[in-house]
Image (cartoon, coloured by chain):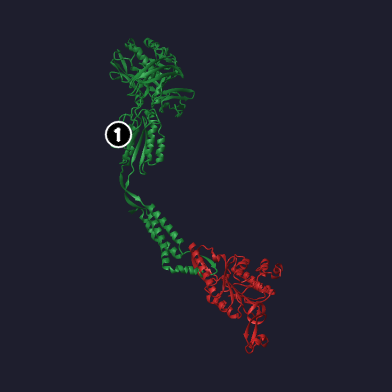
Amino acid sequence: MTPEAGRKVIGSTLLDAELIQTLERLRLVSRRRLPGQLAGDRKSPRRGSGVEFADFREYAPGDDFRRVDWNLYARSEKLFLKLFSLDEDRTLSILIDCTRSMDTGDPSKELYARKLAAALGYVGLAGMDRVKLYPLGAEQSRPIGPLRGRAHTHRMLKWLDDLKCDGRGELGAAIQTFLASEKTPGVAILLSDFLEEEVWTELRGFGVRRFDTTAVQVLSPEDVRPVLTGDLRLLDSESEQSLDVSITASLIRDYQKALSRLQANLRDECLRSGLSFLTVQTDMAIMDIFGRMLRGRGTVS
Amino acid sequence: MGLLSAGTLWLLGPLVAFVVALYLLKTQRTEVRVPSSMLWRRVTADMQANRPWQRLRATALLALQIAALIAIAFAAARPFAHARQRRGQMIALILDNSASMAATDARPTRLRWVIERARNLVRDLGPADQAIVIAASQRTQVLSPMTSDKAALNSALGLVRQTQLPSSMQDAVALARAACKSSRSARIIIYSDGSYPELPEDLRAGLPLETIRAGASAANTAITLLNVDRQAGRTGAFVRLSNLGHSGEAAEVTLSLRLNDRLIDAREVKLKPGQSQGLPFDLPPSVSGVLVARITPEDALPQDNIAYAVIGRTRKARVLIVGPGNMFLEQALATDDELEVTKAQTAPSPNKLGAFDIVIWDRTDAEAEAPGAEWFISSSGPGAPAKTGAVRESDEPVWRPGVDISRHAELSSMRFAEFSSLRPAEWASTLAEAGGNPLIVGGQKNGMRKISFGWDFVQSDLPLRVTFPILVSNTVAWLLNQREVTGSYTPGETVRLEARSKRITTVTTPDGRRIALPEGIEDFSETLTAGLYSWKQGERTGVFAVNLSSTEQSDLRVARPDTPAAETAAESHTSAANKELYPWFVLAALAVLCTEWLLFHRRM
């Protein structure tokens, strides 16, 4: 599909022609072989009826006699099965933090996350992966997918356009719900600002469940460098709790140190759990995210 | 320490309560929605970890605010400290601006030199010191009141003008003592060359009197007299030169005499120190104009190297004799070529009397007053200086001392049968008397001189005496006010311009200033500098000269030793005084508020 054609078909502001042109050249890469449900373009850790020889194993009662390597039996008088690698499809789960904290910043973190999800989803669809989108913590939106093939681009984008970040729930609980519902491990991309109490246990769940996960922290410039001054009453967008502060230069410095500590802890925890961690700012171009960061970390190629 | 306005402290309680109330009400905060308050809570939680210190810091802010309030309240209560304060002293600065202060032996002149010294003293005055500036010469001038305003004092010093007046310190010192009498630490500083007469003992007692000497006893040659005399048809000038130096070499000067800007004579004169020499000059008989005598080269006091004489016109004076005829008087008057005598048996009409410079009423009473001078001989009239009184028998006539017309006119041997005892008018005075009764009375009325003789010449042997023509000549000269012919005055002398009209008279001084006299006033007393003065009243004009002609002022010896007592200026006179401390409290309040501001912005 040409970019122009893509724009006509898509009819969404989340993707533009230039970005689509770039995304067309990308493919999702998983750092481990993941089992799929349908035959596809990706190598499966499971052995099956593929054309590429993978291994031998001794015959066990119940095995398909058609896979016995008779030449080997003639030489060793033992029954061995000839195993072939299985080409299966792959599941790309895009998890979008839909709590209210994402509905802040200029440009909005929620919009940026939807754009990023649209781009990643498009790469998955173009690569014939099974694409699922999960609104973490959303009150009204429901997950969508699996979607496969470019034909579902329009559906995916419409879902993303309709997505509302109105959740008050906790991110950790939403992740646990996702992990419980998703039986097949695949590629998971978690888009959140992570400005919540630590979700270490939930993040470890991705590793335990052998998801090839990339945690993307989406922050606005105001999150990094707050433009606040004077005596303020800070209202938490999710909990609606207030906090009285008198903004001073030293207080801003302390906040930035606290944010750095949070990011460092996230990065360490992800590393321990086998996750990739990435921080993006909403004033960065989506194309740069793919070009430099995701490609550099092996998430796409 | 005490408080001048302690009642203000009552406000402190409500104010502190107000500040505390404000503190409790806290700040009105702006609500801002943030994605998550998690990080902010962590940051503030860190501070909560230091909560005791935070609480302490918040308390410190409140304490600082209250401290500032207390400082301001105490400043308003005007605290003071008991202290010994240096009491300001009163200084009277008397600057001699007499003629001798124009001498150039101190640069640029003695007066300028002392003004600079006085400026230095004013500059060094303390904040509590006060001074008064007085210019002293024959006329005393207070140029500034007793003040501590240095600008006003400097301005007053700039107003001290050089005059050619004689020196006199008496009035100035009396004024200075009066100005300083309220102070126990006062002193009088006289800036002078010391040419003034000795001060009376009562003026020297009491207050410290210091003299700052100007100049250094310079030698000086001066014209101490220029006189033009006209007698018996001859006109002569007399110049007296004096070398007022008292040591050193003889002075060699050139005396030049110029009449109406034309050199008429010049002589070389050598004068030993202390020597004076008179030099007579013959002038043309009918000369008139301005005669200028000048000596060269210039010396330390240029003002006395030049003298002027204004020689009046040689118009003959017109004299009218009203009476039965007096051969002796007529002959005596005929000897003077400058007189044009007319005789009349009876008095002409009053209008015609104005044509005569002198009207002589000889044994004939006047019915109307002549506008000019009048001479009453055994007669009286409206303009007479005396009324005739009781007839007295002869007695020995005696001149009163200092009478002009008595020069070479001896009356004591005169014999006469009787005389009328004169009763002088208020404006007249007795010039001669006989047996204690006024015999000759004279005076000046409306600018014209009038004289009365109380006896009949014919009834005495006076006309037969040598004295008679001298007496007549002296009397006529007195009546004509001869000095007008050679109008020359000394500085400070009042000049009667005799403009004979009620119009405004304008006088132009030698330095070009124009002084308008009030309407009807003809006395001009601003003769402060030597030189030629001109006056104008309508179409009438005139010139008169003012000459220094003062041996005392030309004598440039510094008469009194320098008695600098500058050290006493620093002598501290202390007194108990309350020193207000409120500026320190205001400063403390500001410092506390600055500290509070800094602490507030470092908070959290």
Count all numbered tags in the image, as a single digit. 1
Q: Can you tell which quarter of the image residue B130 is in?
A: top left
Image side of residue B488 versus residue B560, left or right: right
Q: Is residue B60 above or below residue A275?
A: above
Residue A235 in percent (x, y) is at: 53, 69
Residue B96 in percent (x, y) is at: 36, 32
Q: Which chain gets the red colouring?
A: A
Q: Secondary structure at mark 1?
A: helix
Image side of residue B13 versus residue B392, left or right: right
Of the chain colours in the picture, the one used for chain B is green
Front-most of residues B134 and B210: B210
Residue B463 in percent (x, y) is at: 34, 11
Front-most of residues A205 and A138: A205
Q: Chain of mark 1?
A: B
Q: Characterize the local packing of mark 1: few (<14), some (14-19) or many (20 or more) Cα atoms within 10 angstroms.
A: some
Name the outermost residue toward the front: A75
Q: Is residue A45 above or below residue B257?
A: below
Read off the residue under disc 1. Answer: B203
Q: Is residue B581 above or below residue A117?
A: above
| Residue B368 in sight | no
Front-most of residues A200 and B30: A200
Front-most of residues A73 and A135: A73
Name the outermost residue toward the bottom: A61
Three-letter amino acid code at the position of disc 1: Leu
Residue B223 in percent (x, y) is at: 38, 21
| Residue B8 in sight | yes
Q: Can you tell which quarter of the image residue B342 is in?
A: top left
Image side of residue A265 versus residue B216, left or right: right
Q: Is residue B212 above or below residue B368?
A: below
